[in-house]
Amino acid sequence: MAPTTQPVTVTVTGAGGQIGYALLFRIASGQLLGPDTPVRLNLLEIPLGLRAAEGTALELIDGAFPLLASVDVTDDAAAAFDGTNVALLVGARPRSAGMERADLLEANAAIFGPQGRAINEHAASDVRVLVVGNPANTNALIASAHAPDVPPERFTAMTRLDHNRAVAQLALKAEASVTDVDGVIVWGNHSATQYPDVSHATIGGRPALEVVDEAWCEEVFVPKVARRGAEIIEVRGASSAASAANAAIDHVYDWVNGTGDRWTSAGVTTSGPNAEAAASYGIPEGLVCSLPVRSQGGEWQVVTGLENSAVARAHIEASVAELIDEREAVRALSLLPG
Ligand code: NDP
């Protein structure tokens, strides 16, 4: 049956890269927004990546996807974000040998600042943004700061891959299905300081900490999840791409379609509607921080009222301190307006 609704415009940056290649065909097949929603795909690349993105666009056409209304490739951010409803900011500057953290932040601010401005000027009024390119949380903060007319809560950072990794490891350990696991949380930064937390989780309705050992969580599970990206590189010989694309799909699908009562994790802004909830966990305003969330009515809402142990609080504090450090480093370089 032909789709009946108007196409939604989805922009993917870094579309010629690995994650882009794993992501775009799933968007075209309807897995991002659902089986009834046609999509117009705008692919943004830097000039060096344009040919790869153009090749991917040819393959997208060859997929004859019923839901794919159009596909355009450009290196012009204004054109790429024109009328965008969903922006997936994947392209980022990787850390090269000898690069200091300040250099990395500066190089990425030069990408995410202008993209934030272009979103502010050209995107649709309901635009939702997911930043995948690293350092994702701070890149999201920079993009949002350059888009003063877009509510800050529309800018998010991807910690769903960390969340999915945590759910999968817990299910493996408990010899349960991933569908039996609920209430896992990834707190903080999408970095090695993140805190995958099972203390509020349940497995088949039972508290997870009755099923798995607390010492295993602290000594094996937390470092395993936090270092999974490095493990993939070591084993596969390349960084994770399909699982990152899968997590981006999960994040946007849940954001748009809702999570019901289940929780997930997302990097959300701690200013605006979620400021009070973030403050209740000791997390200050003006960050993009991974928190337990539900999506209702197209908005991420932070799950409130959780009691955290001293160990959990220490982990969360350390990761939040890193986010504050990144923000201050960007501010010191005058890359954060306001
Ligand atoms: P990938 O597609 O593999 O990765 C893209 C970004 O996603 C990187 O910043 C990467 O971070 C990040 N990422 C986040 N989570 C994960 C995860 N779990 N696993 C792996 N990566 C993750 O990179 P490629 O080099 O293949 O492609 C990047 C493309 O972006 C290139 O084609 C380049 O030309 C383009 N680009 C486009 C820009 C634009 O549109 N303006 C700007 C800059 C680049 P990490 O580096 O830490 O792995």
Image (cartoon, grey):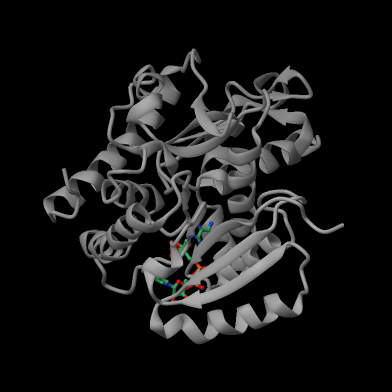
- Depth check, front residue: 274 or 102: 274
Of 59 and 197, which appears nearest the observer? 59
Residue 152 spot, x, y in % from top left = 36, 39
**Residue at image location 82% in from the left, 59% down from the top:** 2
Q: Residue at x 33, y 73 (%)?
A: 96
Q: Is residue 256 above or below residue 274?
A: below
Q: Is residue 119 left or right of residue 214?
A: left
- In the depicted structure, whether residue 76 falls above or below residue 38: below
Between 5 and 46, which is closer to the camera in this rendering? 5
Locate residue 253, reporting x and y percent: 64, 45
Depicted 108 relative to depicted 304: above or below:
below
Taking 290 as reference, is 309 above or below it? above
- For the C terminus, which image quadrant? top left
59 left or right of 320 in image: right
Judge whether residue 16 can be spotted in this image.
Answer: no
Relative horizontal placement of residue 71, taking residue 189 as reference (left or right):
right
Q: Position of residue 337 (x, y in %)?
A: 17, 48
* Residue at image coords 27%, 35%: 286
Q: Where is residue 269 drawn, in percent x and y?
A: 38, 36
